[in-house]
Amino acid sequence: MFRRLLAALILLVGAAGVLILGWPQLFSLHRAPGVTQLVSFRAAGAAGGVVILLFLVVLAAANPRFRRLGLSLSALALVFVLLNAAVLSSRGFGVDALPARAGADVTVVSWNTLGGAPGAAVIAKLAIESDADIVSLPETTEQTATAVAVLMTAAGLPMVPHTVAHGHISKSRSTSVLISTALGAYHLDESAGSTGTLPSLVMVPDSGSGPTIVAAHPVAPQPTELENWRSDLHWLAGACPGGNVILAGDFNSTLDHLAGLGTAPGTTVGACTDAALRAHSAAVGTWPTFAPALLGTPIDHVMTTANWSIVGVRVVENLDRAGSDHRPIVVRLRPAG
């Protein structure tokens, strides 16, 4: 009797774990301690589930006394794998090339450079090859951003750099954004505030016409920063109230974490929608670079309001050894309609 009760308890706990980690939004646990970290790695979790499934099947086949429980646990592992595979497939694994640029298109590059580790020349090369109009650079100092802008301007893509730093000791506490002069002059909207631990910038056009550009960097959801991380995500939602907004950066969050922050059906954060989700490439991992992109976590995003359509999205994988632990993301936008 005890063995049966223990087996039933194990299956009950296993089923709860499968549901919570497979779809934490169902229980409003997607920003809860522990679950937040585990759900970040859906693809890696699914791969691990396959390994566990095979192990349980082999063990059940070899041990008749464990067979019933083993096969039941195998069924739970299979459900976990299939559930994660379905979620990832619905978000999409995307394509590697961007379609040709049209006259009114705007290209956005976002790259957390880990304190400018790749160097200004590498960052500028990517931006120039992408024909970037907006370059969001979390963890990038003013000195590096200025050097990138000089190189881009010399290449025929004149850019103006803007940087906000929370102190000057750690390079991770700087966020920079480069904006093409073709978009007009921009200034920092200090009244919009910022994320708390790490800075974000809200740039608005001097002329009043053109997109508001938000370079975003919420803090990572480490146990000691979890409350600040949640606060940062709510700030991001408020930074996209509607109108004409382009939001780009290292969100330290996947689409699972951002659930419920949209203000209307189909939106992701405030009135903004994730470009990679619209392009069916939101399952491609941008962090960490030592893991294959299909097993990584997609925490770097470009988001826009509905007045922009998505021409293409590319997660850049050929710079994995450039020095940063993040992959750049390049998004080409086109005015809708």
Image (spheres, grey):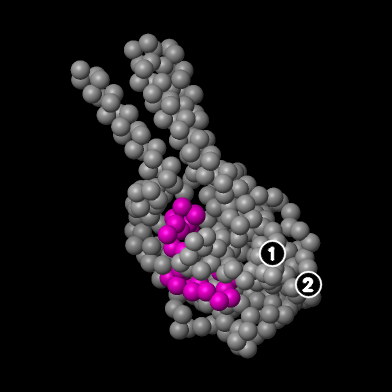
Residue 144 located left or right of residue 55 = right
Residue type, mark 2 in image: Gly
Is 151 left or right of 84, judged from the image as shown?
A: right
Residue 197 lies, in percent from the top left, at 41, 68
Residues shaded magenta: 235-262
Q: Is residue 26 magenta?
A: no
Most extreme residue toward the left is 1
Mark nearer the N terminus (2 vs 1)? 2
Residue receiving disc 2:
103
Can see residue 204? yes
Secondary element type, mark 1: strand
Q: Give residue 31's position: percent from left, percent from top.
A: 38, 55
The quadrant the N terminus occupies is: top left
280 to 113, vertically: above or below: above
* Residue type beneath disc 1: Arg
The dot on residue 265 is none
Image point (49%, 45%), residue name: 41
Residue, x 46% and y 52% (percent of image)?
A: 256
Percent position (x, y) of residue 249? 55, 65
Residue matched to label 1: 332
Where on the picture, by quarter, is residue 4?
top left
Residue situated in front as seen by the camera: 209 or 322: 209
Q: Can residue 328 be seen here?
A: no
Crowdedness near tag 1: few (<14), some (14–19) or many (≥20) residues, C-alpha within 10 Å? many
The relative height of residue 61 versus residue 204 in the rendered view (above or below) is: above
Q: In this rendering, is residue 337 above or below 278?
A: below
Residue located at (34% from left, 49% from top): 27
Q: Is residue 121 left or right of residue 84?
A: right
